[in-house]
Amino acid sequence: MTQGFLSLLRAEARTIFTDRVIMLTVFGGVVLYSFLYPLPYSRQVPRDQRIGVVDQDNSSLSRKMIRWLDATPELEVVTTLGSIEAAEAMVNRRELSGFVVIRENFRRDILLGRPVNLAVAGDAAFFLVYGAVAEGAATVGATVGAEIKVGRMVIGGQEIKAASRRWTAFGLNARPVFNTILGYVFYVVPAVFVLILQQTLLIGTGVQGGTQNALRRRGEGGYWLEFPAWQVLSVRTMVFVAIYSCLALYYFGFCFNFYQIPRHAVIPDLLLLTLPFLLAVTTFGIALGQLMMRRDLATQIVLLSSLPLVFTSGFVWPNHLVPWPLLFVANFVPSTPAIQAFLRLNQMGATFDQIMPLVVQLWTQAIVYGLVAWWLLKRAQRAES
Amino acid sequence: MAESSLSSLIGREIRSWGSDPWQLALISWLPLVLFAALWWIFSAGIVTDLGIGVVDLDDSRLSRTLIRQLDATPALRIASRPLSVHEGRRAMSNAEIGALIVIPYDFQARTSKGLKPDVTAFYNGQFILIGKAVKSALFQAQATLAGRIDGGLALAQGAALPQAAGLAVPVVPQLTPLYNRGMDYALFLVPAVIPALWQVVMIIGMLNAIGREHREGSWEQWLEPGPLKAFIGKMLPYVLVYWVMGIGFLLSFHLLGWPVRGSWALIITAQGLTVIATAVMAGFLFVLVDDLPRSLSLAAAYTAPSFAFLGVTFPASDMPSLALFWRSLIPVCHFMDIQISQMSRAADFGAVALDFGALVLFLVVLPLVVLRLAPGTEDS
């Protein structure tokens, strides 16, 4: 029995570690993506968006405001323009991310306590760019307001009524939590890493299944047809889960540390989540692999599924707005509950009992896909004998 | 020889589709289903009814008015009324609510005294896009209600003058989101996600086409007319199919109400160049390893992260130079710059001439592909 087990383990490990496609995807892919994915986002937030100012007021205050706009971390004033049309043309060519218009009599109206608007236009084809322009301009708007107090007018004998008309009854102090700097690495990487682990693991198991199916159809046998199906399934699962436990440690440990991604989960909780996740993905992948008749199909299917899976996992777009049939399908894939569970546990500080429904979903997937994989392996063996 | 004419090569490729349902799916219904699914995900367009929690420590007429105002904001919905900030924070950790609003003690009393109390809102920064939508909806609700409370009232009720004198003159930014007035997420993301997936579909379909010759042992027969001719004959049907697919999604953007404000001709030309560049890169990835499964692994590394490099969600201008270098090697990234310049706005050709140049430049890889395909250099 142990003799058989060991030879099965050896055979299984040999097919995995000598398959160049599996090695290239599993180790090469995981390591490459750990650098490539965070690379475009490494500056975390867009800074110094190039804006223009249309200064129709040309006062001491408007010139001061241009300096303040330039001083915000979000903005960099690169030019002053004569007309709104000229500014728009530059945004059209993407030479500017937006522009601010300081209207005629801006300073005079402010001193008179009249309602003043600061016209701001930003390139909303890019929400992050537009947000930065809006944020920077709002900061300067508030700075101007704070600088020129109503008090001056009141003391100077101006009309109180006009001053108080623009007075806000209460303020709003909005603060982001969890990802307090709204950094893009902190946003994308913790979620996408879960997906990368899944996708490369699915390719690994899928390529192995497809390869063995292709061999079987050519009439070539192998250890996977000789050992009982449940043994093949358990040993294969063990090997892949062992490999991926190391890769998961590399991602959630080394990489999170390297990118300074905040971590809230304690290690035992993280392990208790990683285990059903890896089991569910491995059994899902072994089952899928049994359906692949060719060695190259798994990579193709997995590659095509990545974008839809990212956008139905609920961290880019709220799940309650995604049409239910899409969510229904997505929930059969382990990454859908897993991304939510990892984000809540590790990024947002949820307790393990809070994410229990997601953990149960992953265990259910692991068991169901395990049974399906076992049945499919058995069926292949029957077809052989 | 009629056998080796370009048209017979094309015919040979097209006939192969009949016995390969997967390949047929990749050039027809499968990408269309995926494109439609991606659009469907974002079809709601704007964030609505996002659940938030409110902790009302004041429990006054004014605080209840504020809660009603928040609930009436289309983007928001009061999902829970936690009894404490701690309890609310717990709900936020489990993504049950997207924001937690805390109305302070004496909110009404301090408002009527003109003390301008602050309502605190914690929003989920982990889901940045959703968080930003929540934040702007919160400010909108605050502005509406705060504007309704007459400022003069406070003074009339006897707020001391020095307090009023300390108030700031608010300079209200009047914001214009150019090119996407309604801040529609579907318009923001779908025209970028679909080309990114198009890139993936193209490279897979083209690699399959080359790999089939290996699998079916017809490699020598395919290359008989000469490597250049054989490669062009094989790729031409895919170039045409995927080009038509590109024109198709562009037309559907138009039908969805996302018009092309600039030049259709420029976008469609850019699509043609993108497809050709992809065909050359597919050939390159294949000859690099001479094996379909491994070339697909390379294609995965090459195209799977292309959405991240497109520069739509995170602007290219803020990417480090190494990322920009990688970005410049992906055809669809150049296409995206061209599409944006012509779809949302009507920029002149000069603004995207470099991207056109880059797409044409991919052709320099073609001689390498042809050299490696030439008989005698096949090492396996």
Image: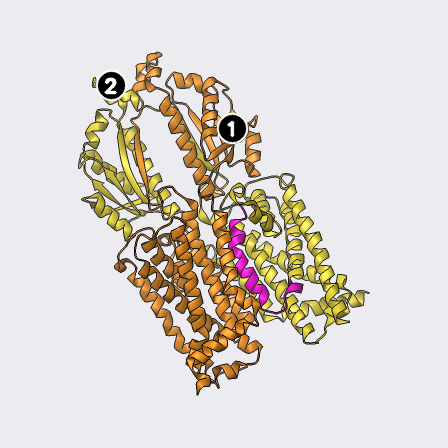
Chain colours: A yellow, B orange
Task: Name the mark on residue B54.
Answer: 1
Quarter of the picture containing the N terminus of chain A is bottom right
Towards the viewer: B366 or B249: B249
Residue at far bottom of view: B1
Residue at far right of view: A1
Which residue type does callout 2 highlight?
Answer: Val
Which residue range is magenta in the image? A289-314
Which residue type does callout 1 highlight?
Answer: Val
B317 falls in the magenta region: no
Q: Please provide percent x and percent y for residue A240.
A: 65, 61
B61 shown above or below A200: above
Name the residue located 21 percent from the left edge and 28 percent from the top edge.
A109
The residues tagged by marks 1 and 2 sit, at their Cα atoms, a distance apart of: 37 Å
Left or right relative to B194: residue A246:
right
Secondary element under disc 1, as helix, strand or loop, is: strand
Chain bearing mark 2: A
